[in-house]
C-alpha cells in the first residue's frame, strides 16, 4: 500500500514570496491533516479535513495560510506572503477516521530567506 | 488548552539499559494518548496508544500506561537496542471536547541515543 505522498520535498524562497505544498493521502483515507514542525519542536496542527470539509482550522494563520482539499482526495497548503518564521517542515497525514492511526508523509522542508 | 510536556533530550543510554521517557499532559476532556517515533531518515510513525485511563499500550517491547491521576503516559522499555535510537514524541487527541476534531497535540520530542 502506498503511503502519504508530498511534494516538493524541499523548497527555498525569499520572504514575501508565495509557496504551495501538495499532499496525496493514502487511498480511502477520509481524514487529512496538515502539521507545521519548527526545528526542535513537535508538530503543530494547522488544519484538519474530513473528506472536503474543514473540521478544525483554529491554529491556521488565516491572514497568510490557506488550504483546500478539492474532491476529498488531494490537498494543497499555500502560504502568501511567506515570513521568516514560516521556515519549518510541513507534514501531511491521513487516517480512516476519528482516533484511528494517523499516517504521516515525509514532509516538505521550507526555508524562507 | 491542551498541552504535552516531555523530558528534554538527548537521552543517551548503553545497549540493554532500562528506558523511561517521561510525559505529562494537560487536557480539558478525556484524551487519547499516543507515542510516535521518528527513526533517522524516516517519517513519523505510531508506536503505541491508549484511549482511556489505566489502559496500557505496547509495541516492539515498549510500554506506556495511561495514568489519569498523575496525568502521565511515560514510555518504558526493559532493554534498549541500538536500533531504538530515534526521536520519540508524546501526543494527545481530544476529539470529544473539540467537536470531533482529533488532530494531535505533540510534545517537543526526546532524542534517544543508544550506544553499543
Image (cartoon, helix red, strand yellow):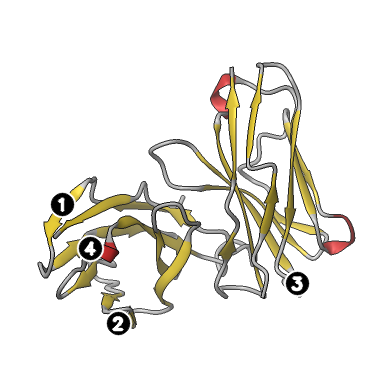
Q: CA distance from mark 2 to mark 3?
A: 34 Å
Q: Is residue B44 above or below residue B73?
A: above
Q: Nearer the viewer, mark 1 or mark 2?
A: 1
Quadrant occupied by the N terminus of chain A: bottom right
Q: Quadrant of residue A55?
A: bottom right
Residue hosting label 3:
A27
User: Which chain contains the residue that carries disc 3?
Assistant: A
- Report the Cα–Cα distance between label 4 and label 2: 30 Å
Residue A51 percent across, percent down from the top left: 80, 65
First-in-chain label (4 vs 2): 2
Q: Badges 1 and 3: C-beta atoms under 8 Å apart?
A: no
Residue bearing mark 2: B54
What is the chain letter for disc 1? B
Chain containing the residue with disc 4: B
Question: Is the residue under label 2 in contact with that under label 4 (CB below 8 Å)?
Answer: no
Name the residue beneath numbered marker 4: B82
Lower sequence index among marks 4 and 1: 1
Amino acid at each position: 500500500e502506498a503511503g502519504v505522498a508530498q511534494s516538493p520535498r524541499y523548497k527555498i524562497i525569499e520572504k514575501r514570496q508565495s509557496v504551495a505544498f501538495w499532499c496525496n493521502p493514502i487511498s480511502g483515507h477520509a481524514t487529512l491533516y496538515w502539521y507545521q514542525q519548527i526545528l526542535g519542536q513537535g508538530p503543530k496542527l494547522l488544519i484538519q479535513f474530513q473528506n472536503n470539509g474543514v473540521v478544525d482550522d483554529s491554529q491556521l494563520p488565516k491572514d497568510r495560510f490557506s488550504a483546500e482539499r478539492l474532491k476529498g482526495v488531494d490537498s494543497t497548503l499555500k502560504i502568501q506572503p511567506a515570513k521568516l518564521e514560516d521556515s519549518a517542515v510541513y507534514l501531511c497525514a491521513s487516517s480512516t477516521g476519528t482516533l484511528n492511526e494517523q499516517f504521516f508523509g515525509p514532509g516538505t522542508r521550507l526555508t524562507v530567506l | 488548552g491542551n498541552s504535552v510536556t516531555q523530558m528534554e533530550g538527548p537521552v543517551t543510554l548503553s545497549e540493554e539499559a532500562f528506558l523511561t521517557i517521561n510525559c505529562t499532559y494537560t487536557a480539558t476532556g478525556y484524551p487519547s494518548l499516543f507515542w510516535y517515533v521518528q527513526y533517522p531518515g524516516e517519517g513519523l510513525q505510531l508506536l503505541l496508544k491508549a484511549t482511556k485511563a489505566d489502559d496500557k499500550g505496547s509495541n516492539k517491547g515498549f510500554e506506556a500506561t495511561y495514568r489519569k491521576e498523575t496525568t502521565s503516559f511515560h514510555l518504558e522499555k526493559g532493554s534498549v537496542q541500538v536500533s531504538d535510537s530515534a526521536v520519540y514524541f508524546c501526543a494527545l487527541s481530544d476529539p470529544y471536547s473539540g467537536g470531533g476534531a482529533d488532530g494531535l497535540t505533540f510534545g517537543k520530542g526526546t532524542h534517544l541515543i543508544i550506544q553499543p
